[in-house]
Image (cartoon, helix red, strand yellow):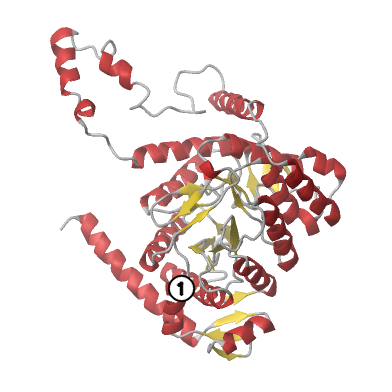
Amino acid sequence: MTRKEQQAIRDAEIVELIHKNTLRILEEIGIAFLSEHALELLRSKGVRVEGNRAYFTEQQVMDALAVAKKDFVVRARNSKYDVKMNTEDIYMTPGYGSPSVVETDGTVRPATFDDFLKLAVIVQQSEEFAINGGILAQPSDIEAEISAEAMVYATLCRSDKALFSVCGGKVQAENIMKMMRIVFDGDITEIPCTFNLISPLSPLGVTEATIDTIDVCALNGQPLVIAPGNMAGATGPISLAGNVSQANAEFLGINVYAQMVRPGTPVVYGFASTVSDMKNMQASNASPGFVKEAKYGALMAKKYGLACRSGGGMSDASGLTAQAGVESAMSMFESFAEGANLMMHACGSLHSFNTVSFEKFLLDIETFTRMKYYFSDLPCDEDALAFDAIKEAIEDEGGVYITLDHTYERCRIDPWYHQVSIHSNTKGDPNQALYDSIHKRMDALLNSYECPALAPEKRAALDDIMRGLGMKDSDIAKV
């Protein structure tokens, strides 16, 4: 038996141990639902509730998994960007949630609405993405009370790709559903058209705002990316198997509730558990521990037949450094190796989610193309095996291949081509040469942008919603 086969057997054993431990957590420790109406719904459906904690049986957990919609299509404004959520395909999303921007010299500044709009355009112009939106950068110059709606509004207007929404609470969710009904011409309960990130309150809790968001999204038939983010040693046990078990319990318990709100609610196993740096108690989103947890999160999702979020382009580095490259590549490699289907935080993330770098954003897109190339199938048809080309080169061309028709015909097919990295000798500071290459690529993307068509009456209706919420006309004009 090969080492790889032995590891596969061991991984299957670990998955079963974590699954059984999870069921014990749900039955004996339970999950706190910090909402009276949620507790009442759970009671009415036969769930044991004591105080604010709900305790789930194995039957309730497995029944909810059976009824959850696992394979579905998230519609985009442009159907070429429709996203097929399943256990096979892989899609990446940009960085999510950073309140600040880091410059190439390490300077950190608050993110602005202009930064958000610029990132939305880069995503729209980059063919590697089918999904746009989320909190590309938290705009400090937009009122916090309307920032969720403002980011969704801007993404809908600037992009025709599938939408990663922004979750804030009941009011924000209802406003966003109203926008989606405008864009998709009415009732959307049978038209998944948003991804909605649902974050538990680790350890083993769910806030009222999160529950309200689940209610609104589920009742509108919209997919939930249920994403436990417990930190080993801080908001979860320091042992990785224990931390994965707790995260799995949070996912499964919330899924039971979501399926009670609306049976058949689409769900994604949005695993986001990480580890703590025990020297300073900060989240460490790019350590080998995070990557290892991501692996087993993906394996748990596969056990349940669910599409999963896993890995990304994470880095704890303070800037675009060698550390950032190593950490992001390791994280992204795990996403491909374990068959992640939704790769969040794939581009631009630094400082453990706290900053976004435009330069790293472009470099991470290129890293995605590297991974996609490596993990793609190796063509082995007769032309690819190249027996005739080898024979011609040896017998007729003196061992030279560059002059062959075979080379000419395949030179745009077989090699991987870089977008921003430097593959020639440079003079002066090599980092500056890389930055210049990145900025050249960025300028090309931004300058070639044309706003995707949106029916004038739909744009006017979206504008009216934002004006009604108090968004400034000057900000609406930027969009």
Q: Nearer the viewer, residue 201 or 237?
A: 201
In the image, residue 244 above or below residue 346: below
Label 1 SS: helix
Query: Mark 1 sits on what residue?
Result: 67
Q: Is residue 39 left or right of residue 422?
A: right
Badge count: 1
Q: Quadrant of the N terminus?
A: bottom left
Residue lying at 71% horizontally and 55% vertically, measured from the top left? 179
The image shows residue 223, relative to residue 330, as above or below, that is below
Give the answer, above or below, for where 227 lies relative to 457: below
Above or below, 438 against 332 in this view is above
Residue 140 seen from this side:
no
Q: Position of residue 49 (x, y in %)?
A: 58, 89
With 50 as the anchor, is 303 left or right in this view?
Answer: left
Q: Residues within 10 Å of mark 1 (few under 14, many from 20)?
A: some
In the rendered image, which quarter contains the C terminus? top right
Q: Quadrant of residue 292?
A: bottom left
Closer to the camera in the image, 143 or 291: 143
Where's residue 343, x and y in %?
49, 51
Lateral position of residue 91 relative to residue 409, left or right: right
Q: Is residue 4 visible?
A: yes
Q: Nearer the viewer, residue 93 or 83?
A: 83
Q: Position of residue 134 (x, y in %)?
A: 63, 51
Residue nearest the observer in this picture, 452 or 118: 452
Q: Amino acid at mark 1?
A: Val
Residue at point 82%, 54% (across, down):
143
Residue at horizontal 64 percent and vertical 61 percent from the top: 187
What residue lies at 40% left-to-right and 66% top-to-bottom? 300
